[in-house]
Image: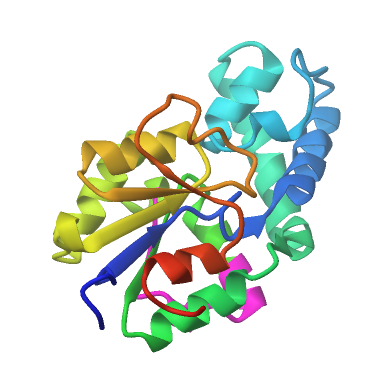
Amino acid sequence: MTSLQPAAVLFDFDGTLVDSAESVLASLAHALRDSNVTPVVPLTRNIIGPPLRQTLATLAGRDDVALIDDLARVFRADYDSVGYLRTEVYAGVPEMLQSLRAAGMQLHIVTNKRIAATHKILGHLGWTSWFSGIYALDALTPPAPDKPHLVRHVLQTESLAAPQTWMVGDSAEDQRSAMQNALRFFAAGWGYGNAAMDGADTVTLTAPAQLLRAAGLGG
């Protein structure tokens, strides 16, 4: 491993490694129809990213615990049985992950997505063995309140030194998570987030191969 390379890289999942938008939107629409709820905001990619209950409350326009419980139950049943199979992979991501692993780096996932769904998708894609750790808000007891706390937990649990750890994500929350934990951040420009919108010192990637070049790998 060269001095340019990090010891570990933390990856967001949706919008960074995989495109779950169409599969998530389809299952959200199914849950809303099942409960006869008309969404108060457009059912578009822009709503994807926050934890499930937060997204459902935004769509329903109210934080009714019983309603959100029902919507979440129907969403999970649909997504965990058929929805996740429609997950798409961003071009160049498998090659990037393989190259980073071959260079001896630890790869970890830090996601707002439910841990059960994350494991299902990784297993379906055959990616599970590439990651040293797979972390989600709901994988902690009690659940992590947000992603900055989750990233802090990962650094402590995995004994990762911040100066030797990079983070890659597509959202402003991913960016804050990196900044609050003193990690070098790379914005996945192909995702559906807005990681670089606040003008912070961020390296914006337009293709996965650029992360390899930043680490001194590839041409």
**Residue under the point 64% across and 70% down:** 92
Please say whether residue 120 is one of the residues in the magenta stretch: no
Instruction: In this rendered view, identify the residue nearer to me: 179 or 28.
Output: 179
Res 56 quadrant in image: top right
Residue closest to the eye, 117 or 3: 3
**Does 208 sit left or right of 147 as displayed?**
right
Q: Using the image, determine if residue 108 lies above or below residue 184.
A: below
- Magenta range is 121-136
| Residue 19 visible in the current orientation | yes
Q: Which of 74 and 39 is in front in this view?
A: 39
Q: Does the magenta stretch include residue 134?
A: yes
Q: Which residue is drawn at 58% across and 37% down?
A: 193
- Asked if 160 appears above or below 193 in the picture, the reply is below
Indicate the position of residue 20 as horizontal and vertical percent values.
69, 52
Q: Position of residue 208 (x, y in %)?
A: 57, 64
What colouring style does the render use? Answer: rainbow
The quarter of the displayed image where residue 1 is located: bottom left
Furthest-bottom residue in this view: 102
- Name the side, left or right, on which 116 lies relative to 149: right
Can you see residue 141?
no
Q: How many marks?
A: 0
Where is residue 43 drawn, in percent x and y?
A: 78, 28
Identify the residue at horizontal 50%, vertical 37% (top origin).
Answer: 171
Residue 203 drawn at (x, y percent): 43, 47
